[in-house]
Amino acid sequence: MSEDYTHGEMDITTQEKTFEGFLKFFTYLFGSAIGILIFLALFNT
């Protein structure tokens, strides 16, 4: 193991933005699914 490495010094801004994108995507997906289910329940389709 390299002696130059210090825990917590890695730049993770790209990973954080990617994770934030996944969270937004799944939030919108979940919200859309709930909306579709409510629509179907209201109109008995």
Image (cartoon, grey):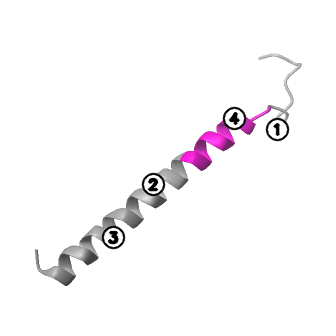
Residue extending farthest left: 45
Whether residue 39 sits left or right of residue 2 in the image: it is: left
Q: Is residue 33 magenta?
A: no
Which residue is label 2 attached to?
26
In the image shown, does 13 or 33 lie closer to the viewer?
A: 33
Q: Is residue 28 above or below residue 9?
A: below
Q: Is residue 27 above or below residue 25?
A: below
What's the residue type where badge 4 is placed?
A: Thr
Give me the residue at 68% from left, 43% from top: 16
Q: Mark 1 Cα within 10 Å, few/some/many (few <14, many 20+)? A: few
Q: Which contiguous range is marked in magenta?
A: 11-21
State the CA–CA distance, disc 3 to disc 2.
12 Å
Q: Looking at the rendered structure, which numbered label has been put on residue 8?
A: 1
Q: How many numbered discs sit on the rendered protein?
A: 4
Whether residue 16 sits left or right of residue 27 in the image: it is: right
Q: Specify which label sits upstream in the sequence, 4 or 3.
A: 4
Q: Can you tell which of label 3 and label 1 is closer to the viewer?
A: 3
Q: Can you tell which of label 1 and label 2 is closer to the viewer?
A: 2
Check disc 2 and report its element: helix, strand or loop.
Answer: helix
Which residue is label 3 attached to?
34
- Specify the quadrant of the image occupied by residue 18: top right
Give me the residue at 53% from left, 53% from top: 23
What's the residue type where badge 1 is placed?
A: Gly
State the CA–CA distance, disc 2 to disc 4.
19 Å
Q: Specify which label sits upstream in the sequence, 3 or 2.
A: 2
